[in-house]
Amino acid sequence: MRNVRGVIDDLRTALRENQEFAPILGAALGALSAVAVERYGPTPDQGSVAVTVTQARASLLSALALVFTGLSIVLALTSLTAGSTANMFSKRLLRMQLRRSSDKLVLGVFALTASFIVGSQILLRTRSGDSLAPPLMMIVAVILLMLTGVLIVWYINGTLQSLRVDRVIRWTGRQILRAAGAHGRAVRGDVVVPEIDLERPADAADVPAPDHGYLVRIDTNRLADLMASEDARIVIEAGTGQATILDEPIGWMSTSGTLSQRDLDRVLDCLTIAKARDPRSDIGYTVQVLVDIALMALSPAVNDPQTGVECVEMLTAVCAELSRQRLGIRTRKGSDGSPSVVVREQTMGDHLDAAGRQILLYGSEDQTVTAALLRLGEQGQRFATSDHDRDLARAFTVDVESDRANGAQSAGRGL
């Protein structure tokens, strides 16, 4: 089925981004744990420290009230942090942060504790009020309550720390490098080149997008097998992260025979279209988050050029690391040694140029920002590994120098 992979990827994305799965799983585990502890736990001993069922139910009820009080604190703090992140930094950053496992862990443990306490309450109703409560039930309840309290303190501290600008910028930089690592694993079997010169044959057929959305994965291994069996060549002009429109061309394919609809369907089955870009492996998406933070800081409403400078400095460090990654045009060679599969992905220079020019557009009037951008362009030339990246970095440096000179002249006239 042509869009099976897209459906699977959408499901995985929903599980990573939505917050419902962890509480549901925690509630189920809590209820099952309550039943298991009540049935298979040790029997109460009159000689040991024990409480009656009536006392246990009252204690569990108080514990449940504490759990829901803590949960209300967590939810209020989460809501406040989400709004602050979207307004201070980037809405894309908010999406990435909601994928973090820490939030899911806290919600899951809260649901586990509450479900265990409620389940224990229900099971204790089947016992006489003067009889002794299962000791293991009370011990587990106390441990879960203590764990919940520790998580509240840990979560509050982590949430407050996540609003620090320096931490947000560093965290975003790490996400870019993680996406680069995931991308590197995806292109492991490809030959990556910075540029390629391929002329489209006159009889080549368009490769239409199979759906609306974003191209998140391209199986070049399967494409190479298909091209070998059909004695054909395919070029995908839109790399991962690019928006697609149903039936609009995203590349072309040439073959020595007639291209049937079945052949086209087999090709499209190698492409995964999702409803949203995947921050795990989409370098461009994560780089844009860093740009968003810089643009927000440089906006007249915020007017914080130093944060813009810090974002450019992080972008410089990130580009230095990206230059060591296998970024560029992905190719697979056919039996004759010529490329049979070509996917035009972005290089380090492409990311530097796109990100730097956006920041330059809004920060060209600030000399500290342009100084940082100038260093970005100069360093980009230094660690570029191809003529393509070096030319882009050089052209960007020239434009920054021009804007910087114009800005200095305007400031002089103002004085």
Image: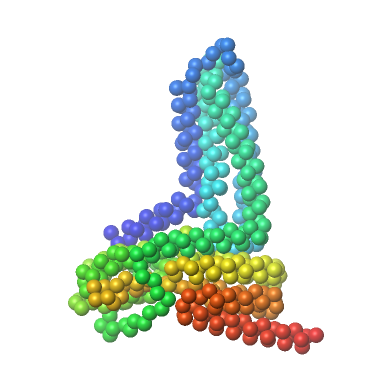
Residue positioned 59% across, 84% down in the render:
398
Q: Residue furthest top?
A: 47
Q: Height in image: 299 above or below 128?
A: below
Image quarter where the N terminus lies is: bottom left
- Horizontally, is 128 left or right of 270 in the view? right
Color encoding of the figure = rainbow
Q: Could you tell me residue 17's position as x and y percent?
A: 49, 53
Q: Could you tell me residue 273's position as x and y percent?
A: 38, 64
- Horizontally, is 47 left or right of 195 in the view? right
Q: Could you tell me residue 52's position as x and y percent?
A: 58, 17
Q: Could you tell me residue 95's position as x and y percent?
A: 54, 58
Image quarter where the C terminus lies is: bottom right
Residue 243 visible in image: no
Residue positioned 49% across, 33% down in the render:
30
Residue 165 visible in image: yes
- Horizontally, is 289 left or right of 251 in the view? right
* Camera-nearest residue between 111 and 187: 187
Q: Residue furthest left?
A: 257
**How many tags in the picture?**
0
Residue positioned 52% across, 66% down in the render:
321
Q: Height in image: 361 above or below 151?
A: below
Q: Height in image: 212 above or below 392?
A: above
Q: Height in image: 31 above or below 241?
A: above
- Which of the 4 image quadrants contains residue 393? bottom right
Residue positioned 66% across, 70% down in the render:
309
